[in-house]
Image: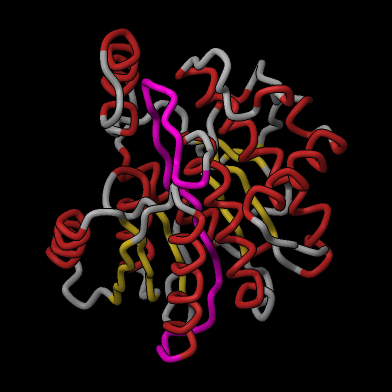
Amino acid sequence: MDLPDDLHNMAFVITGATSGIGLGAMAALAKAGALVIGVGRSEANIQQAARLIRQENPGARLHFFLADLSAQNHVRTLGFQIQKYLQAEPGGPLHALINNAGTVSNRFTVTEDGQDLQFAVNHLAAFHLTHLLLPQLATVPESRVVTVSSNSHRGMRMCWRDVMCRRKYNTLLAYKQSKLANVLFTYEFNRRFGKNGIQAIAADPGLVNTGIGLKGTYGLVRWIWQRRSQLGADPGGIGEEVAWLAAAPEGNTRESAYWKHGVPIQPSRYARNESEARRLWELSESLCRIRFGG
């Protein structure tokens, strides 16, 4: 899957851009000439990511924002910062948002908004940031919202009685539910906004050698993630796949809203359930204190 040769008139936003899949996608898009706006939560990691990309591509057009995506206030501020930057920077309109940021936590961790950390970062941040950048995406034909999900959504259902997993927290089940939410969001977005020319895609990266499960875990959970990462693919290559989904001509991606390694496939039947997706959408709007419309 080759990216278009010239993306000089396009801008892309990537969350979780300082390592793993996000860094790979950022490098691929920058190499093709795009203006790439990355989001990270550590200034040191941001500087290192910029240095790594510019070692291979000295002329890369990069800009980074620092944000804690677990906090709705920070997501809101980030959205306004990106809007302002895009208005001032002659780098082309926003062609795609790549919701890549994710986290895993061993313990039930409450955010400042009273939400489960995994659900807040893995789903709500993507939902909220998409809402904030929708006006920019709506100005571009064939714009995209690519959200990195996971095969782990299969076999899961939303736990409506305890979406935040407060009663009996299980790290892996909380993670799997957040990845299911990514797919439900993708399909509901297309039902609401596909007619406007914006396509949402859920990207299944498969097993990838990243540190996502090693930062906030210990014991058995950490061991499982270590094993997963050892068996996983190079994140740079997967990042290129995600970049292709964000930048490829529309006809190449319309076949499906769920892709794995460049191949359109079907997610679980439950992940395509319209009533469940609508219910999650309405809950997410309430938790983020926004109204999407559509």
Image height of 64 relative to 272, above or below: below
Q: Residue 144 location in percent, x, y?
A: 61, 62
Q: Nearer the viewer, residue 124 or 269?
A: 124
* Secondary structure predominantly adopted by residues drawn in magenta: loop
Colour mapping used in the image? secondary structure
Q: Nearer the viewer, residue 159 or 23?
A: 159
User: Where on the picture, by quarter, is residue 212?
Assistant: top left
Residue 105 part of the magenta-drawn span: yes
The quadrant the C terminus occupies is bottom right
Q: Which residues are magenta?
A: 88-113
In this view, which residue lies farthest toward the top? 220
Query: Is residue 174 found inside the magenta-colored segment of the image?
Result: no
On screen, residue 152 versus residue 52, left or right, reads right
281 and 179: which one is in front? 281
Q: Residue at x 64, y 28 (%)?
A: 163
Residue at the location (47% across, 43% down)? 121
Whether residue 47 is situated above or below residue 157 in the rendered picture: below
Q: Residue furthest right?
A: 275
Residue at (82% x, 43% y) in the render = 278
How many numbered markers are drawn? 0
Residue 256 in view, yes or no: no
Choose top left, top right, bottom left or bottom right for residue 220: top left
Could you tell whether 161 is left or right of 41 in the image?
A: right
Lateral position of residue 95 relative to residue 228, left or right: right
